Each structure stands twice: as structure tokens, then as C-alpha cells.
Amino acid sequence: MRVISSLENCLQPTQVALGNFDGVHLGHRAVIETLLPAGLNAVASGCSEARGHATVVSFNPHPQVFFSGQSKPLLTVLPEKVELLQALGVEQLVLLPFDRALADLTPEEFVEKILVRQLQAKKISVGFNFCFGRNRSGTVEDLQTIAHQYSIPVRVVPPETIEGTQVSSSEIREALSTGNIHRANRFLGRTYALTGTVVEGQKLGRTLGFPTANLSVSEQKLIPRQGVYRVEVSGPTLTQKQMGVMNIGLRPTVDGTRQTLEVHLLDWSGDLYGNTVTVSLEQFLRPEQKFESLDALKDQIRHDCEQARSQSI
């Protein structure tokens, strides 16, 4: 999949899904998959040249970040987003540099300059609440009206709902902040994962009899609620997914002051230092807590491991 920030290098013509797509959740996938009625086979067979190359157009930075000057953690950092979009069958991801010039385009100018002239869009897909143009003044109805002048159909995709709740990045963020991993994973359509490099730690876990891999992840990545989780760990050096428990927190029992991500693999031993691993969060087991002694902490870790084993069956 091509990842570009200059429209001069994009494949043309295109079928375009417009949005930020942080999380690439079920609602986002519904928008994107309208471009891929024949799935990956269409790309493989060369049909994309006639139909238009399946293209996701997003913005970097997020418009909210541009206007507020404050960044917010992401559900999917760029490498994760690229991997997820590629798996769906997207051919190119266009990251439009969001600057004052782009922000000042009227809805009509955005369609004519970006979608028609530079992307040669043959079809457009957006979510029901998509806004665009100067001061977010353009609605999906405006997009349909303007695009119709260029004979470009616009598909407005209704929201995905689960048990009466609309699937959204905000709902997923809220679920992760409270440790409701089950809800977050349902809305994502997959398990929420943290990918990073295993780095040297203080080796406290090894001292306690539960060696851990200390994970360093992107500063942009949203970290869920502090506590202990049942997880699955995968990576190039692991022949198969490994069951484990992860602690996210400050380690108050040993007066820690810096948040760490520590994973103990239940049925594996070896050296992971310097390797990249992906930790998929399956279940929230308990909040982080301070214990009266290291022995009490050790007993609790043993219980956490037993609980993780029993609930993964």
C-alpha cells in the first residue's frame, strides 16, 4: 500500500474514503469497505485501474490538533493504521498536510481542487457525520450536492451501533480509560493492541520469580487504564501467540514514579530484549494496587497468572 503526503504522487483515478479513521473501528471499516465491493480480489486482478484506486484520504495533523495546538493520544499510530488499511485492501493512504491553506478552503474549493482535480475521484464514501471545508461548514449533504456537479456519486454510510450505542472513537477511548476492554474490542472489531520494543527494566519481576518484558511504545499511543490485564503476545521471535499478564502502572509497592508496561509470558522463557512485540489486551483483571510487602505482591501475581489461565480456556 502506498502512503503519501503529496497529491502529485497519487495513483489516479481514485475511489475515496474521507475521514481521520483513528482506530479503524467497525464504523470506519463500513465507510472504507464500500470502495471494495469485490474485496482484495479486485485489487489483485487489476480492476482498480478501471474502477478507481481504493484510496483513504486523511489529515495530518488531525484538524482538532491543528486548531487547539494540543495533541491527543491515538488509538492507532501511523504504522498500525497502515497495516489495518492494507489488510482491508486499501491501495493508498493520502495524508493531506493540514495547514492554514487547507483549513481555509471552502467546501466547493475542497471538492474541486482536491477531489476532482488532484485525486480524480470517481466515487466518494464518508461517514454520516463528516464535515469539511472552512470552519467545518460543509455537511455530507453539501458534499453530495457539490460532487453531483462533477457526476461523482457520494455514499453516506450510516453509523454502526452495538446494543443501541453508536460505534465511535470517543466511545472506544472512554472504554479503554475505564478498563472496559471487552467493550473497546467489540467496537474496534478486534483486540486493542500495544506494539513496541522490549527494553531493559529494573528486573524486579525476575527477582520475584515472574520475569517481565518491559515495553516501550510510541508516545502518541493511547495507553488504557492502569491495572493488570490478560493478554496475548506475538512477535517475529515468537513462533506462536503467547498467553501472558500485563501490568500498566507506577508499581506503587516499590515506590515507582514512572508509568511502565510490563508483560509476563506464562509459558515461555527466553530473551526478548530489543525485539518488537505486539501485546493484545484481552481482559482487565484488576486495578493496580500497593501491597504491604513483596511477598504479598508475589502472591497476587501468582493469582493473576492463575486467573489469566483459567479465563483464557
Image (cartoon, rainbow, N blue to C red):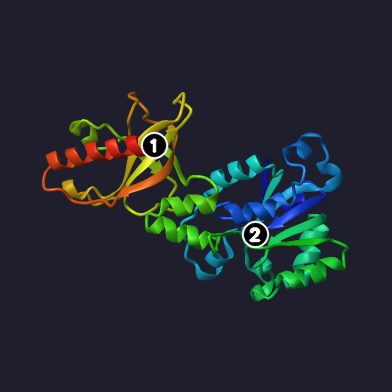
Question: What distance separates the C-alpha of mark 2 from that of mark 1?
Answer: 36 Å
Type of the residue with mark 1: Ser
Label at residue 19: 2
Label at residue 312: 1
Query: 110 or 14: nearer the eye?
Result: 14
| Relative image position of residue 180 (x, y in whole percent) | 40, 54
Q: Say which residue appears at 33% left-offset and 36% top-offset.
A: 310
The image shows residue 1, relative to residue 274, as above or below, that is below
Circle 2 residues within 10 Å: few <14, some 14–19, many ≥20: many
Q: Say which residue appears at 79% left-offset and 68% top-offset.
A: 144
Horizontal arrangement in the rendering, residue 76 relative to residue 160 (left or right): left
The image shows residue 259, relative to residue 109, as above or below, that is above
As helix, strand or loop, the secondary structure at mark 1 comes to: loop
Q: Is there any visible trace of residue 199 in the rendered image?
A: no
Q: Say which residue appears at 42% left-offset and 43% top-offset.
A: 282
| Relative image position of residue 29 (x, y in whole percent) | 64, 51
Type of the residue with mark 2: Gly
Q: Say which residue appears at 63% left-offset and 62% top-offset.
A: 159
| Relative image position of residue 89 (x, y in whole percent) | 69, 42
Label 2 or label 1, whichever lies nearer to me, is: 1
Q: Quadrant of the N terminus?
A: top right
As helix, strand or loop, the secondary structure at mark 2 comes to: loop
